[in-house]
Amino acid sequence: MIRGALAAVLALLSLPAPAFGQEVADRAAVLAREEFRRGVQSYNRFGFNEAILSLEKALSHKPSEPLLLEWLGRAYYRSGIEDTALRQWQSALSFYEPTGAEGLLVSSRIETVRNRRSLYPELDENERYVESGRYPGKNGEIVLYRQPTAILAESDGSVWVVAYGSNELVRIGPNGIIRDRVRGPLNGFDRPYDVARAADGRLFVSEYKGDRISVLDANGKWLSNIGERGRGAGQFIGPQNLTVDQEGYLYAVDFGNRRVCKFGSDGEFVLSFGGKDGAFAGLRAPTGIAALGGQVFVADAATNRIVRFDRSGNYLGVLAEGAFRYPESLRFDADGRLVVADTSRVLLVDPATSAVRELGSLGNAQVRIVGADVDANGNIVVANFAAGEVSVMARMDDLASGLFVQIERVVADKFPEIIVELRVQDRRRRPVVGLGELNFMLSEGGRPVAEQEFLGAGYLSRKADIAILMERSIGASALASDLSAAAVDIAGGADRVAALVSAGEQPVMERLGSAARIAEAARGSAALYGPRWKFDLGLRLAATELLPGEKKRAVFFVTTGSLGERAFERYGLAELASYLANNGIAFYAAVVGNGRADRELEYLCSQTGGMVLRAFRDEGLAPIVRALRDKPSSTYALKYVSSLPTDFGRAYLPVEAEAYILDRSGRDATGYFPPLE
């Protein structure tokens, strides 16, 4: 044994020594790999600052490695520093073949991050919508539904379709698959025409031939009827379109009686309106109806105009006329503009200016668009009664650019079982919801993975996490009791308060527990208040605490509304907005006292899907917090079993994800390190 060992040593000594440059290069490669591993692991633990430090060190050893540059760009992007992220990706692109898979992916990412403008689905003023897909009413000889008349969009990306010809409601998912069928009471619907949803989730369905309105629970179970045939109070002849106002009142177009009937949330008749009133000649053929901001808008197909009433039925005048052919359904978009179904076209009407413009049209031989609504993904979904099908209309640039897919995290703790968390958005950062197992394909180095399984989607979750950030300025100290009361109100509506942060000179995480402890922590001691309080550091700390939790999440900032001069010493306004938006965190500002929110706070809210609130609203803040459960979320989780060799945990293993919906798709590629063996 000694002889053999000696021979081995002699043999080793006889090998030629490496050149100095090669020895330095090998050491640099080893150090770069070690730092790269640390950076990837920190990133997957939401430690983006730590990831940046490790990846910068790795690049110092291997400055021309495009994979390191890509990862460094990812870490800067998730940290909210988008300008630097773009520079890293641009540097990585210089090492790739422009038309190769890596080059195209990085180019697409750069273009998307540069060009996107807004967050949630809205109808762009200058955009043209074209047909991107259909939900046919027939599959071969099998009838799926007949003669759709109305569309009601849901927050999960699906839509309720009222099928007049087959006497039912069908709920269709974004992939065009029917999820539910509702046929009403025991004897069935009698020519259903429109559907509206109440704040408590109940559905109201008008029945044109049945001369009544059916009331269903949130799942479509029939509960009761409203109305009967006749010309008296609360009676109908051919009820058509419906709407529910912000106070919960139901309005129904009574087509045969040329009027609108108003009911309480319990179905009790309140009043009817729309007849001749002074200079107003009365409704002649009322069709679409929509209510918002204390006004009720009614389309009159006989006079080709939209008229306005107050909630008591008093005539307020004409909103728009002369631009319509035969206006039917009315729906409000997220910005309070009317989406109008008008023969073969869908129009957009601004109630503030009366401006009318065409969003798009269908070129089918058989076209009569009776109903239209904007779905959760920003598409216009229309009921084409004449063709007996539903069409989906998308923005032209969305069809050209596809989806923005980001693999946000890879969990390899139980290798070979791998969990991939990813986010799917459109090119303007708006969430794409409603996807499932059929919409994803994972691969390793270009080969489909084994045992792919869909674990879940953020939009399906009914839980939300919040963090509360407390202003600690001198001015806020005089309102400490109000600050505390607002924080308690916010916490009362939350599933979980992940953190309460005092934004003092050195932001601190307060210890939480009971409601009394939250009130005490929110009030804060006198020592916490001062002129050098740090909004930016406090917001970063509060937001970071949310990253490992629920995918629906928000920071609530309790404030006097004034940020002071030191608000952005460490992090700029744009960086903070990007940090929140790129990690799916909404920002809300709850203003106490009589102050007005600074424009910077309004900007943060607008960029992240939050809002500025008065802390002491009549209804309180808790309902806003609870509403987070219904916000769209574009995060998804999938699992698979890896078949790649690990080199005892030292290998960097690739993973790719593709997402598809109708004619749109997107892709991302990244990797991970398995546990060391």
Image: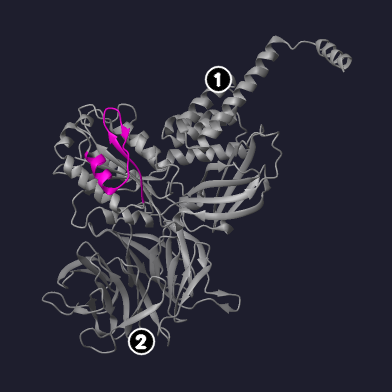
The residue under label 1 is 60
Q: Magenta stretch: residue 499 in it?
A: yes
Mark before the other along the chain sequence, 2 or 1:
1
Q: Quarter of the image for the N terminus: give it.
A: top right
* Neighbour tally class for label 1: few under 14, some 14-19, many 20 plus, Cα within 10 Å: few
Q: Residue at x 48, y 33 (%)?
A: 75
Q: Residue furthest bottom?
A: 230
Using residue 284 as the reference point, say whether residue 550 is left or right of it: right
Query: Can the viewer see residue 116?
Result: yes
**In this view, the mark in front (2 or 1):** 1
Q: Camera-side residue: 528 or 392?
A: 528
> Against 406, is 215 above or below?
below
The residue under label 2 is 210
Q: What element does badge 1 sit on?
A: helix
Q: What element does badge 2 sit on?
A: loop
Q: Position of residue 174 (x, y in %)?
A: 49, 62
Q: Amino acid at mark 2?
A: Gly
